Image (spheres, helix red, strand yellow):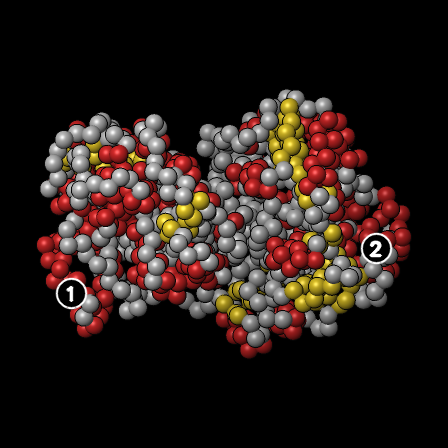
Amino acid sequence: MANPHADLTRHLARCVRGDVENGAAARALTTMDASNYRRVPHAVVAPRDAADVAEALRVCREHRTPVVPRGGGTSIAGQATGTGVVLDFTRHMRQILELDPASRTAVVQPGVVLDDLRAAAAPHGLTFGPDPSTHSRCTLGGMIGNNSCGSHSVAWGTTADNVRSLRVVRYGGGDALHLGRGLPDAPPGLHEFAAGHLALLRTGFPALPRRISGYALDALLPEHGPDPARALCGSEGTLAVITEATVRLVGTPAARALAVLGYADEPAAAEAAPGLLPYGPLTVEGMAADLVREPAGLPRGAAWLFVETGGATPAEAQDRATRIVRSADALDATVVTDPAAMRTLWRIREDAAGTATRMPDGREAWPGWEDCAVPPARLGPYLRDFRALLAEHGLRGTPYGHFGDGCIHVRIDFDLLSEAGVARFRRFSEDQADLVVAHGGSLSGEHGDGQARAELLPRMYGDEMVGLFTRFKDLWDPDGGLNPGILARPARLDENLRFAVLPGRPVDVAFGYPNDGGDFSAAVRRCVGVAKCRTAQPGPDVMCPSFRATGEEAHSTRGRARLLHEMLAGEVITDGWRSTEVRDALDLCLSCKGCRTDCPVGVDMATYKAEFLHHHYRGRLRPAAHYAMGGLPRWLRMAAPFAGALNALARMRLPAALARRLAGIDPRRTLPVLARRTFRAWAGTRGAPEAGPAVVLWPDTFTDHLSPEVGRAAVRVLEAAGRTPVLPAPGVCCGLTYVSTGRLDAARSVMRRTLDRMGPLLGRPLVVLEPSCAAALRTDLPELLPDDPRAAGLAGSVRTLAQYLEEYAPEWTPPRLDRQVAGQTHCHQHAVLGDAAERRLRERAGLTGELSGGCCGLAGDFGFEKGHWDVSVACAEEQLLPSVRAAEPGTELLADGFSCRTQLDQLAGRRARHLAEVLAEGLPAAPPDGPGAQRRA
């Protein structure tokens, strides 16, 4: 079927130097933002400069096609979705054009990520004041479009307060307008429009620190400049397209402290917040206990205020925080000055946009009334009335937010899947709008109105003012081509809901999805679009290594979730599980499982990828690597008797090249060396006197056939701790390689055989040395065999070596090694198992230094597979390789994962060791096979 928009796309491609795409993948990736809404665009254009923007707007006007500008796509009200052409500013127009410390200003393109601007300003002691929780991925253009705020607005104001001037292009192209206070540029008739409505503009807007709803027409008053740039802030892409912004920078304190105040309940915290403002805090943030799912070192209470203070010295910042504690009538309080501890506490707050999307019982919760604002003095009574309104409608929510500004965020457990639930959503929205207005508030206090609230603006402003909004829009955009349906002449708040297109019944799947009721659609719905996976800067987290390597939305966790959503919808991606668009996006997913922990809503793309590959290749020929590396346990068992001969062949150029080609391995990869004597073979020749209570030691494929020295070291350590290692019967396997290649029928068969062969050892503590195998046993096993109680029992028995020693041999004292370490925590350990026990064991052994975060890039079969070399190397170069190169001579390189050790060996020529090897080396010398015993059950 011919593309009805082919002429438009061809015209754009001729006139625009940037990227023009109208394929299913590009369109699917931009159907949604972080809201409840979905609109399918005709095409996506990534302009290279302002001239490209003007040309795109000219062509779209000729074709009568609407345009929506888009930054990071984290808008919560639907304003970053559109049905015509999406202008994506994150690819090319992301330059900081000028930064002037003397004038404290910066000139930026709209695609600049906020954290990039803050990093550039930091060496000068400056920052950009507004800082939404999405600061690591939101863009300045999007912040201006929404008039974003963030936690520091009590000190530094909203984005509009920090914009000096704008260069914009109107629909239809033409010359750019330079907008700012006192600058003459403006659409014809704008000054006359303001002059004709002075009385209404002076009286029609509530005096609020967080009044974001509607257009800021009061910025056109003579006493305010007039300032058309400020009037454009918060216009949500409906008036003009920003191509350049001059913004104000503010001085950032040299030191900070955090006063955490505990209160009996949420209204008590809200009522206390305004009284803290005279002390000049940087933030006054609030949240209640129902947002804190795990103990977090918070003071006593059921609600808390986070009050940040600044100073020229740490002592000054701490003194200011202490004064706030003394003045606050709090139930309990603490002052935190350690930067790492402060980051941990702030992460609870910043992840709330995702955390709050699941109620404690697992029920889904959604935005829609995400950021209403009332006068701070009214916040306590408003929260009481708000909670009562929720109860009246049979709904639940978890309020939190900017208590010092009277702005509350909340996700509510609306049922947006059924007609009755959507009808309740509408009724609640109407009642909630009335409640906010009754308290003198604004329907939006940060994220804009979008489609979620614009329909209800007459309840806040009245018909006359809303009529002015429409006339204002028409002055700027008489053709109505910019983001139609948003703000002026809005769409209904219950139209275009993104859930309506999903299947009405659960999809037949292989995994159990226990946290999503067994429903794959519900699992995919977990992605709400907050886009933490789009963070470009490396850190202690893992997610999302492929996005950081490529910078492409399709290779982010969110992008892949969007493609899966559209695959289930069947409108843009029409070939279901056979989709090549989804396959290509998932191809560069490393299955690192980082998103399982690092994503605030727990999206598990490794599982979704395995599920997709299972269906995509069902009854079809698979890539060679799926057979070769996916069946690695079988091939290694068959190869074990011939290890010496096979190693010799692998050292020969032609046989090695042929083997790589047949196995689908990248020609730049070196084939691993097979152990001449497997771990099992070594264990079978040892004596059998018992050293103490038995512990089951898992002989994973990698340890058994490729690094038996790790298994031997673990035996020595366990025996030194007074334990007798016992191996399960031959043939047990976690199924990891089958899962990662989507061979789920084979994986289940292997797992059932494993459960059968574990026999009487089931239920005993199980030490697993390879983190990826431990993670597979802990998560994939029970999720693929949800109806077999043995699977859950085995999963619950899995321990790393450090976890086992800490839990079952706490009296054991490890050898004192006293040396520096570097290396990497395995991504599966970070995501599934945690590394707290390893950290404590290293500390007891005198192993000092931090292991890097991120992913090594080899990730099991991923880095070996042909076509993955560049991404694999890029991931290694992000944190692992630089940390190893920077290590002092004599530093011990630690990597518990076979993949991590292999990557270091092949890319850096450095040998890393498992923690068990390092500990065993520090034990008293022993005969080759050691005293004591190891038995096989």
**Amino acid identity at mark 1:** Ala
Residue at the image point whose x is 86% and y is 43% from the top: 203
Residue 214's x, y, as percent?
73, 48
For marks 1 and 2 on the same chain, the one whose residue lies earlier in the sequence: 2
User: On residue 220, which mark appears?
Assistant: 2
Residue at the image point whose x is 87% and y is 46% from the top: 202
Residue at the image point whose x is 56% and y is 35% from the top: 412
Q: Nearer the viewer, residue 802 or 524?
A: 802
Q: Circle 1 sits on which residue?
A: 648
**Amino acid identity at mark 2:** Leu
Quadrant (top left, top right, bottom left, bottom right) of the N terminus: bottom left
Vertical order, 760 against 116 (above or below): above
Q: Quadrant of residue 291?
A: top right
Left-right relation of 514 to 54: left
Q: Quadrant of residue 118?
A: bottom right
Label 2 residue SS: helix
Residue 799's x, y, as percent?
31, 35
User: On residue 62, which mark appears?
Assistant: none
Residue at the image point whose x is 46% and y is 47% from the top: 850
Left-right relation of 162 to 789: right
Question: Comparing marks 1 and 2, which lies closer to the viewer?
Answer: 1
Q: Nearer the viewer, residue 451 or 105?
A: 105
Quadrant (top left, top right, bottom left, bottom right) of the C terminus: top left
Vertical order, 323 against 282 (above or below): above
